[in-house]
Amino acid sequence: MAYSTQSGVAIPENLERRIDAWKGIGALVWCGVFGWFTLVHLGRVPVWELSMIGTHESGHLIFGFTHNDLITLVMGNGFETALPLVAAAMFLIRKRNWVACGMCLAWCANTLTDASLYIYDAPRGLMPLIGIGPVSDGGTQQLGDWARILGPEHFDKLFLADPISRDVQHAAVLVWVLSLAVLAGGMAWNHRRLARLEGGPAPAHHSPAEPTAPIADVGPEEMWK
């Protein structure tokens, strides 16, 4: 069985499986880097953070058309987390690509860590924010998303910022562990498939021949009847 590339060139499946094995190794490195910044460093991955910031701000812009201030604020981090989740589901359901799904889940875990830090900062106001300066007499528009969400403007529950932040970080850890499990499962399936392809078909099992009855002697008179 062969696979076809976009150029129409057929690729033997055993070669496809070898390519996927190298992809899996690269995905492990990816998950390791995202795991470091999700579990140890507690921050965005350098360079990749530019796409996360863009996704965050796009969430505010897209859901701003709802004209609901609370939804617009929540969907900054909400859209930042939903995008890799949707991508993971698409890769798994439509492409059966477990490796890509695991990579997207590792990315999702890092967005949850980013949200956890943002929530933790809500009562403190120490994080630098895009587009505005330090908190002054500018009113609530000078506050971060979660300072406004949990503040008097909406829920008035700033005292819950720390426990919510911890719960979101715990979710980040679980999602990252899930990303490794999905990736390991995909690599194991690929390895088994490659082993079957390169090992060739299993030899057919033949049962021992059954003994036959001896042939009786035939005389000249019987032969020509």
Image (cartoon, rainbow, N blue to C red):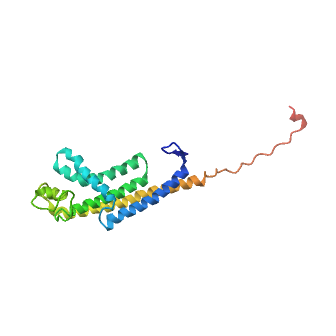
> In terms of depth relative to the viewer, which is nearer, 203 or 129?
129
Q: Quadrant of the N terminus?
A: top right
Task: Give percent across and percent down for residue 164.
Answer: 22, 61
Res. 132 image quadrant: bottom left
Identity of the residue drawn at 41% across and 45% down: 94
Disc tally is 0
Identity of the residue drawn at 22% across and 50% down: 60
Q: Quadrant of the C terminus?
A: top right
> In terms of depth relative to the viewer, which is nearer, 63 or 201?
63
Task: Give percent across and percent down for residue 75.
Answer: 23, 51
Task: Give percent across and percent down for residue 48.
Answer: 34, 58
Seen in the picture, residue 104 relative to 39 is either above or below; the reply is above
Task: Give percent across and percent down for residue 182.
Answer: 41, 56
Instruction: Name the side, left or right, on which 185 lies relative to 64.
Output: right
> In terms of depth relative to the viewer, which is nearer, 59 or 156?
59
Res. 110 image quadrant: bottom left
Seen in the picture, residue 10 relative to 146 is either above or below; the reply is above
